[in-house]
Image (spheres, grey):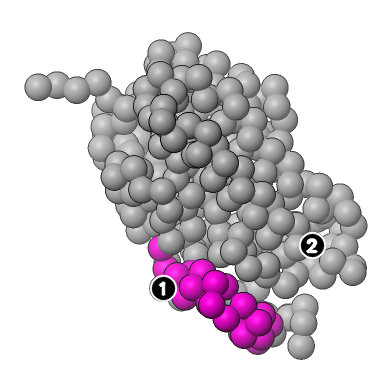
Amino acid sequence: MNTVPKTVIITGASSGIGKACAEEYAKRGANLVLAARQYLVLCEIAQNLEVQFGINVLPVQCDVSKEEECKHLIQQAVSIFKTIDVLVNNAGISMRALFNDLDLVVLKKLIDVNFWGMVYCTKYALPELLKSNGSVVGISSGAAYHGFPGRTGYSASKFALNGFLEALRIENLKIGLHVLVAVPGFTASNIRYTALVKDGTQQGDTSMDEGKMMKPERVAQLLVEAINKRKRTLVITNQAKLMVLLDKIMPAWLDKLLYRHFTKEKDPLIV
């Protein structure tokens, strides 16, 4: 029996985990709504996926830090596909600067994109997700369980994301909404290249060994499987799983481990 394909919205879909999720869902026959600021890149991705997998893809230029653009994204999705089954809140930015040194505009930008972007998209998609018994997904981080040095704004934004989604899950516990908090751990992507430094400009380089990190394609595969199984939490890498555990049982020791880990960065902020 033929089934109606799912409609999946993915923010931050122009690279990294977002792009990999688009490819994974395309393999599974879903209709896609891809959002990012880089519209031309999105259009190229959309065209490639449509040709390769015979699906329908709607690219939408969207800066998730702007409420009206998030509202427009959701309206476009509903206008074209009539339903929303999955919302993957993947858009996000990072930072690399000690709090004592940074301009507060950096923290505001991190919160606007990583937290408010997720809130805006979820708010406008929620009525459709409730109709479809759909899934809302937040791409979190190990930094949401234990703060990372040099990433105060990033850690704060991901702690807020977790709290928001956990509360949303409980509010809708008897209604059928599925809420997934996903913790990929360190994943090879451009998020560290575009991380904001103390004056709000992009770092332009990575401070870590990207070759030792999990590939976004593998993260996407595990993420889509977790969404299909309607899991409440997904912690992917062993490193992330260990950190979540240590935060519960040995938080002071984890402080020291994280301090030591970040002293080994390229051009470390702490020594």
**Where the N terminus falls, by quadrant?**
top left
- Check if mark 2's residue and mark 1's residue have beta carbons within 8 Å: no
- Reading the image, the residue beneath label 1 is 238
> Is 22 part of what is drawn in magenta?
no
- Reading the image, the residue beneath label 2 is 197
Where is residue 76 drawn, in percent x and y?
52, 17
In depth, the one of 271 and 119 nearer the eye is: 119
Badge number at residue 174: none
**Circle 1: element type:** helix
Mark nearer the N terminus (2 vs 1): 2
Residue drawn at 51 percent across, 69 percent down = 244
Where is residue 201 drawn, in percent x and y?
80, 55
**Where the C terminus falls, by quadrant?**
bottom right
Please tell me whether residue 225 is drawn above or below residue 206 in the rendered image. above
Where is residue 254 drawn, in percent x and y?
61, 80
Per the rendered image, the range of residues in magenta is 236-262
Residue drawn at 90 percent across, 68 percent down = 101
Residue drawn at 48 percent across, 32 percent down = 172
Where is residue 192 drawn, in percent x and y?
63, 62
Q: How many marks?
A: 2
Of the residues shown, which amino acid type is indicated by label 2?
A: Val
